[in-house]
Amino acid sequence: QVQLVESGGGLVQPGGSLRLSCAASGSIFSINYVGWYRQAPGQQRELVAVIISGGTTNYADSVKDRFTISRDDAKNTVYLKKKSMKPEDTAVYYCNARITTGTLGTGTYWGQGTQVTVSS
């Protein structure tokens, strides 16, 4: 069984920085895709950043040049580093991953989410 656990959320002042982590555990053969999503109160969940197995990344226009997604394959962990944060970045952040397990089945998994609040 595969689990995704996000961490690193919290309260940060406008202009500040934060790094989120998404750690995958269980019987993992390969992590093919990881995306960070966020959902603000009353809003739909939106895709913020993605990274695929070859290292290619893509970002939503609203976070481009402020957020950086990266991965540490040895730790089965993906990071989202955020700088120059704005109040509109306040949301619950979720990671989503497409993973091939040790039995070579492939599935899509979600973490439980981590709250990020940008406020002075």
Image: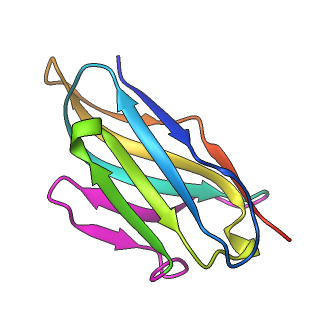
What range is drawn magenta here? 42-65
Q: Is residue 48 visible?
A: yes
Locate residue 97: give its quadrant.
top left
Image point (48%, 63%), residue name: 81
Left/right placement of residue 68 relative to residue 37 reads left
Assess whether residue 83 is covered by the magenta stretch. no
Image point (14%, 58%), residue name: 54
Quadrant containing the C terminus in the rendered view: bottom right
Coloring applied to the structure: rainbow
**Where's residue 68, x and y in %?**
41, 69
Locate residue 75: give its quadrant.
top left
Above or below, 1 relative to 39: above
Image point (82%, 68%), residue name: 119
* Residue toward you, 16 or 4: 16
**Where's residue 61, x and y in %?**
48, 82
Above or below, 94 relative to 18: above
Q: Is residue 45 visible?
A: no
Number of callouts:
0
